[in-house]
Amino acid sequence: LQHCVIVKHGIPCGVASSEDQLKTLKTAWNCDSTSAFGGIIAFSSEVTKESADWLTQNFIEVVLAPAYSKEALE
């Protein structure tokens, strides 16, 4: 499973799990997208290119993950 949590000012404002990382990210974001704006996003797995592309379209302060694919870093 892919896990994602979003925190803003030390308060969780989104959390989700699913088999697909991008779906997990979007579900966590939609828990409270207003609070998630400018927050910290943590993943339990390597960030994929698809998730990285989505992240670049939104204002995020910090992205934490155990790894980042080469394509995601580009």
Image (spheres, rainbow, N blue to C red):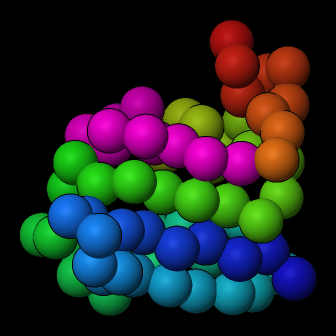
By secondary structure, the bulk of the magenta-drawn segment is best described as loop
Q: Is residue 30 visible?
A: no
Question: Residue at position x 58%, y 59% from top?
Answer: 42
Residue 7 located within the stretch drawn in magenta:
no
Question: Residue at position x 33%, y 42% from top?
Answer: 60
- Which of the 4 image quadrants contains residue 62? top left
Which residue ends up furthest to the front in the rendered image? 10
In the foreground, 24 or 11: 11
In the foreground, 37 or 21: 37
In this rendering, is residue 22 above or below 12? above
Q: How many marks?
A: 0
Question: Residue at position x 82%, y 47% from top?
Answer: 66
- Residue 67: x and y in percent read 84, 39
Q: Does residue 15 appear left or right of residue 4 in this picture?
A: left
- Which of the 4 image quadrants contains residue 8? bottom left
Q: Is residue 1 visible?
A: yes
Question: Which image quarter holds the N terminus?
Answer: bottom right
- Which of the 4 image quadrants contains residue 21? bottom right
The stretch of residues the image draws in magenta is: 55-65
- Residue 13: x and y in percent read 30, 81
Residue 63 located within the stretch drawn in magenta:
yes
Which residue ends up furthest to the left in the rendered image? 34
Q: Does residue 72 appear left or right of residue 16 in this picture?
A: right
- Residue 7: x and y in percent read 36, 68
